Image (spheres, grey):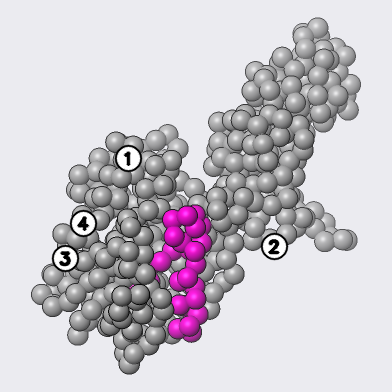
Amino acid sequence: MNIVIVGAGAAGLMAAASAAGACRDQSVACRVVVLEKNRKAGVKILMSGGTRCNITHDCGPDRIMEAFGRGGSFLRQSLAMLPPDEVVRLFNSLGVATQVESTGKVFPTSNRALDVRDSLLRYAIEAGAEVKLESVVKGIERDGDGFVVRMEDGDLRADKLIITSGGRSYPGCGTIGEGYVWMKSLGHSITPTRPALVPLVGGEAWMHEISGVTLEKVGASVWSVPETGQKADKRPLLTRTGGFLFTHIGYSGPTAMDVSGLITGAGEPTKTRLTLDLVPDIQSSSIESWFDESRRRDGKRKVVAAIAEWVPKRLADAITHDAGVNDCSFAELPRAAMMKLTSNLKQLPLPVTGTRGFEKAEVTAGGVSLREVDPRTMQSRLVNNLFIAGEILDLDGWIGGYNFQSAFSTGYVAGLHAAKTIA
């Protein structure tokens, strides 16, 4: 019996290890083969986290599911079988010590993504899987209850087929979306794909001038833009708190990238608006009271100097200049300017015109419809003996190791059940 896995990334290597291990434990004669078109396995692993690889997040399964929004419940069963703490224990057992950062991100103590990739590759091979590099798949066809995988160097028969070929993000890694073509040819529906966890393009001229300014903790919120005649929502569609970076063409950093998928999901940037809370730990009423108190007690002090105690000096200069009071003291501060500064500190409008696209996206939103995959086994509901895992599925989560966790868990379940269904 042949179990063929297409794609040697996080999901594919985990699927290979679990499938080969399950065959061994069942004393079933089975060949597990992983086909990877690149010269290296796990290229995206090597690039991730600034070449450090954020393995998972230090949290429970419920938090992982929350990170995937409406698709999160699909992961319930796979997370029950391989939750975040088990992923950490697995890598520790493979010789990769881990550390938890203050943000909850879990990294290898060595800060080397190479250690993560090498341990996962070794895990799959030692379990009994073959990993064939520079093996380009040209197409996939049904063949009775199995499949024929068309290759440049000859066809390969698969009794069980696991597709873990990834999405369209970072096409330089080889992820150009050919997996969607194969899935469509086998009868699956593909939710339109779009970049997620991607830097945003836009901003006022003064925002571009402060390129490089980094904020450690802000709140980025996405709001729905109402149709003509409709009332504006009182609450944002999504708010994420964390780091933020102004760039020469827009915005980046964890919060900007976390909300990017919701913005691209709206279809047009004009259908949403983005705001930034520069001081999320301070209420608007407290800022207004602070302005009034400063006017009474410290009227000669420059407003920009005081605001620079809350935000970086370049940003303080920019927002006071935008309010027309860059050289103003508290005693001279007009009330209208005070209200604008308060608004900019709590809900700074950030115009968005687009994104950096798949070239800079960390994950792909959209993909194989979750309705057509059994979440208990990762087997296709449409095609028997076909299993699907990882980023090719219509799943995209927040930045912080959530997407690797999804890949590990779905890959593990796909491999395990592909082996279990062997007669």
From the viewer's side, name the closer residue of 397 and 247.
247
Q: CA distance from mark 3 to mark 1?
A: 25 Å
The residue labelled by disc 1 is: 112
The earlier-in-sequence mark between 3 and 1 is 1
Tell me if I can see residue 374 in this picture.
no
To which quarter of the image does residue 409 belong? bottom left
Q: Tell me the tag on residue 123.
A: 4
Residue 101 coordinates in the image, percent (x, y): 39, 35
Specify which label sits upstream in the sequence, 2 or 4. 4
Quadrant where the N terminus is found in the figure: bottom left
Residue contact between numbered discs 1 and 2, judged by CB atoms under 8 Å: no
Q: Nearer the viewer, mark 1 or mark 2?
A: 1
Label 4 sits on a secondary structure element that is: helix
- The residue under the point 86% across, 24% down is 324
Q: CA distance from mark 2 to mark 3?
A: 45 Å
Q: CA distance from mark 1 to mark 4?
A: 17 Å
Q: Earlier in the sequence, mark 2 or mark 3?
A: 3
| Span of residues in magenta | 160-188
- Distance from Cα at disc 2 to Cα at disc 4: 41 Å
Q: Residues within 10 Å of mark 1 (few under 14, many from 20)?
A: some
Q: Which residue is mark 2?
A: 267
Residue at 45% in and 83% down = 186
Mark 1–mark 2 Cα distance, whole angstroms, equals 37 Å
Seen from the viewer's position, the closer of residues 195 and 336 is 195
Q: Residue 124, percent across and down?
A: 22, 60
Type of amino acid under label 4: Tyr
Which residue type does callout 2 highlight? Gly
Front of the two marks 2 and 3: 3
Q: Residue furthest bottom?
A: 144
From this view, report whether residue 176 is shown above or below residue 196. Answer: below
Q: Residues within 10 Å of mark 3 (few under 14, many from 20)?
A: many
Residue 291 shown in magenta: no
